[in-house]
Image: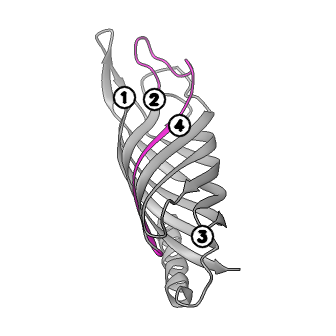
Amino acid sequence: MKSMKKSILALGLITAGLVSAQSADMRNMLKVGANVGLAVPAENASANIGLDVAYQNLVTPGFGLGIATGYSHFFGRENTVNNVKVNNNDFGVVPVAALIRVYPKQTGFYLGTDLGYGFIVGDKKVASNSTVDRPTGGFYIKPEIGYHNRDWNFALQYQKTFTGSTGEIGSQKYSAGALGVGVGYNIPLGK
């Protein structure tokens, strides 16, 4: 039921953006998007899927600053550590980050990153058959390179929450990182 409410809200926001996109100033915008990727390294997770929400202000036509959040769900995977099967749990990352974007041209390639803190949520244990606690979060970074136009952004991105040695099971390191692709829609907010 929660995902249905979120889907309806997202659809409403996108519809409102489409209706107002023709006349609004593109200096301030809400960016709504989705991403999918492969966990790297794939020790405790195999893949991820996520939603992104950000506010961006174009300080100059080629440079944007803002705030970013969202949710990335990492799918746990089975792994063998010291001849013992480990059933790693799914977990999520909720970032609270600064958004930085550089747009060399009005339409075309862009570079950017999100920098902040990633809260790791989900089961308290790394694996269903382990007593090791999962990390609660760490420094978050999400660099990306992509293509943009007035309405859409398409990107190749890497996201990583650094957890240090917390959550390690034997030789298995805890990884909250993924290499993937993302798509986002810009909803203008006016001046």
* Label at residue 123: 4
Q: CA distance from mark 1 to mark 4?
A: 20 Å
Q: Earlier in the sequence, mark 3 or mark 4?
A: 3
Q: Do residues under tags 1 and 2 come within 8 Å of each other at their CB atoms?
A: yes
Q: Earlier in the sequence, mark 3 or mark 2?
A: 3
Dot 2 falls on a residue whose secondary structure is loop
* Label at residue 175: 2
Q: CA distance from mark 3 to mark 2?
A: 30 Å
State yes or no: residue 173 in magenta: yes
Residue drawn at the location 48% of the way across and 49% of the way down: 72
Horizontal side, residue 31 vs residue 151: left or right: right
Dot 1 falls on a residue whose secondary structure is loop
Above or below, 12 against 23 in this view is above
Residue drawn at the location 46% of the way across and 75% of the way down: 151
Q: Earlier in the sequence, mark 1 or mark 2?
A: 1
The residue carrying pointer 1 sits among few (fewer than 14), some (14 to 19) or many (20 or more) residues within 10 Å by Cα, namely some
The residue carrying pointer 2 sits among few (fewer than 14), some (14 to 19) or many (20 or more) residues within 10 Å by Cα, namely many
- Whole-percent x, y for residue 128 in the image: 43, 29
Q: Earlier in the sequence, mark 2 or mark 4?
A: 4
Can residue 62 be seen here?
Answer: yes
Residue that carries the numbered disc 3 in the rendered image: 30
